[in-house]
Image (spheres, rainbow, N blue to C red):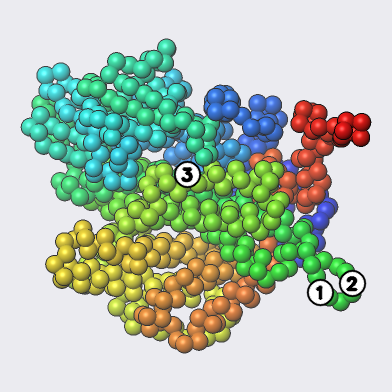
Amino acid sequence: MMEPELKEILKDFPHGPLCKYRSKASFNWKEMCLLVQGKDALILKHKIWSTLQKDPLFAHSTSKLTLKEARHLVFQRARKLAEYDFMPTRHMVGRPELFDNYVMAVGQYEWSVLVKLQLLYNFAMSALYGMGSERHFDDIQRLMNKEIGACFCLTEISHGTNTKAMRTKATFDVKTQEFVLHTPDFQAAKCWAGNLGETATHAVVFATLFTPDGENHGLHAFFIQIRDTNTFENLPGVTIGDMGEKLGLNGVDNGVMLLNQYRVPRVALLNRTGDVNESGTYISPFKDKKKRLGASLGTLSAGRVGIASMATANLIKAITIGIRYSAVRQQFGPEDGSNSELPVIEYQLQQWRLFPYLGAAYVLLQFTRTFRKDFTDMQRAMMNKENPDQLAAVGAEIHAISSSSKPLSAWLAQNGVQECREACGGHGYLAASGLGNIREDNDANCTYEGDNNVLLQQTANWLLNLWSLVQRRQSIAPYTPLGSATYLDSAESILKSKCNLNTPHQWFEPQALLDAYQFVVCHLLRSTAARIQQLMGQKLDAFTAKNQAQAYYYRPLSIAYCEALFLIRMLRLLNDPNIPEPLRAVLKLLTALFGATNLMKNISALTQGGYFQPNTSAALEAAIEQLCERLKPEAVALVDAIAPSDFALNSALGHSDGQVYRHLEESMASSMKARPDWWQLVVTPPMKASHL
C-alpha cells in the first residue's frame, strides 16, 4: 500500500492520447519513480514545485524581458526561494542525495534562480567547509543567516582551466599580518564570477601565494569582502565591472574584478591544506606537494559535481518532451487503404534517435546520486582531518572523475536536447516547446568550471599515472579508493581476452558491455602510453608529445573510462537483490541500450585491439535495433517516472496529459486577432481606378 502522502504526489495521469502507450508498459511507473528518485526526494520536489506554482512571483513569463528586468526578477525569486528554505543547511552535508534533488527541482523550474542562490550562499559555504577551518565558522554562519552573499572567483581573463598559470598574487606582509592581493593587469582580472557584477558582498578568490622569502606556494583560496554590506559600494582597492548579456542564464550577473594592492587579514586564507603562520612560514599537513594538490583538486571539484546534476536535469526535461510528443504526433502509415497514420515513436529511426538519451537520463541519475555522496564523504573526512594520504588519493580520484563526468554529462544533455528539438520537428523550434531555453541554459555547462576537452586531459593524466604502476606490477588499489579503475589491476588478462558474443541477445546484458568497455580502457591506456614513448623517442619534450596525442589518444581514453564508470555505478543498482524484477528487467534494457550505443563509437579500439571478431559489431548493431523495439512500449512510462511536474516542465509539447494541439493553441491564443495593431501602419489600401 502506498502512503497517503505519496498518493497525493504520484497521481494517475488524466485520460488522453498518451494512455495508449502507458497501458503497454510492463512495469508500474510509480514503483520505478520511487526506486530511482526515492520517497524523500519525491516529497521535496513536490513541495518545491507546488509551492512555487501557487506563488504569483514564480508565474512563467510570456514575454521577453530586458536584461535589467530579468536580473531584477531573478533576484526577487532567489530571495523568496531563500525564505522558503526548502533545503536547510544541515541537509547539504547530512543528506547529499536530497541536495542534488533540490538542485534539480529548482533548476528544472529556472536555472538562473538556482544558480544565483547557490553561488550567493551554498557554494561559498561548501568552499569554506572544504578548504577552510574553524576560524571560518563565523563566515559560514553569516552566509547561513543570509547576512552576506558571495561569488567564486577563479577564472581570469587570460586563463581559465590552466589554474597553475593564474596571475593574481597574494603576498604575505609579516609587519601588518596581512595578505596583499594584487591584479597585475587586465588579463589577470577575475571574470565570469556569478553575482560579482552587482550582488555579492564577499568573494572566494584564488591567488598564487607568496611568502615573505619570495617562495611561490601555488594557488590558494581566500575569503574576502569586496563591497560595503550596507551601501554595496566597492571597497577601496576593488574595481568591479559587468560581463553583460549572455546566450543564456541572463538572470545571473556575471562580473569582472581587479584588485589593487588590496589588503586582507591573514585569517582570510582558507587553510585546510596549507597555512601561513604569524612569522610568515608556510605550513601544511601534506609533506608532499602533489598530495596537497590532490586534496585541493578534490575540493575544487564541487562545481563539476554540481554541473553533472544540472546536465542530468536538463536531459530529463528534454527527453520527457521528445518522447511524449513522439507518442502523440502522427505522420504517415502503411499503404493498406486505411489512411491511418502512425505516432512517430513507432518509427525505428525516431526510437534510435531518442531512446539512447532516455537510457542516458537514467544512467546519469544513478551516477550523480552516488557521486554526490562520494564528494560529501570526502568533505566530511577533510573536516575531521582524517588520514592525509587517503584524502589525497580520494581527492585525486574525485578530480579525475569530475573532469570526465562533467564533460560527458554536459555533452549528453546538449546533444540530447538538440536531438529532441529536431525530433519534434517545426513545433520543437517554438519557444512554447521549452526546448530552446533548455538548450541555451545547458550550453554553459560545456564551458564553465573547465572547458570540456581540456578537462578530459586531466582524467587521462591520472589514468596514465595509474598505468605506470600497472607496468611496474604494483597494485593500484590504494590510488583508486572509490573503485573507478580497480580493474586496471587485471589489465594483463583483460587485454588477452576475446569477445565471443555473436548474437544480439547476448548484448542485452550490461555486464557484457562493461567487460568490453574495460578492454577499451586498457587498450587505449596501453596505446596512449606507447604513443607518448614513441613521440618522446623522436626527441620531443613531454609537453609536445602530449599535445600530439590528444585527439586520438587522450580524449577517447578519458571518455571510455567515464562511460565504463557510468556502467559500473548502474550495475550497483541493477545487482540490488531488493529491486522488483519488472523494474530490473526494463532498467537492464535501458542500460544495455545506453552502453551499446556508446560502445559503437569504440569499434576501432575493439577491432584493433583484437577483442571483436569479424561479425561482432554486426551483432551489436542488431542488438541496438532490437533494444529500441523492446523499449518502445516502455518509453512513455519511463519518462513519467522521472519527469518534472507540468509546471516545472513548462512545455506545450511535453505536458503529461498529451494534449499537444490544445496546448499549442493556448500558447498562440493571445495573438489570434483579425489583424495586428500595426496593420494599418504598413499596409496601403487597394488602389482604385479613380486614383489613376
Tell me the residue at 62%/72% (across/down): 627
- Asked if the residue under mark 2 is in contact with the one under mark 3, i.e. CB atoms within 8 Å, the reply is no
Q: Which residue is mark 3?
A: 444
Label 2 sits on what residue type?
A: Ser
Which residue is tagged 2?
338
Mark 3 residue element: helix
Which corner quadrant of the image does residue 93 belong to? top left
Instruction: Look at the picture and state if 261 lies above or below 413.
Output: above
Q: How many marks?
A: 3
User: Are the residues tagged 1 and 3 within 8 Å (C-beta)?
Assistant: no
Label 2 with label 1: CB-CB less than 8 Å: yes
* Dot 1 or dot 3, earlier in sequence: 1
Query: Is residue 610 visible in the rendered structure shown here?
Result: yes
Q: Determine which of the numbered discs, if any, sits on residue 393 in the image.
A: none
Q: Where does the image place residue 392, in percent across and percent down from the top left?
A: 26, 50
Pick the residue in front: 265 or 185. 185
x 62%, y 75%: residue: 625
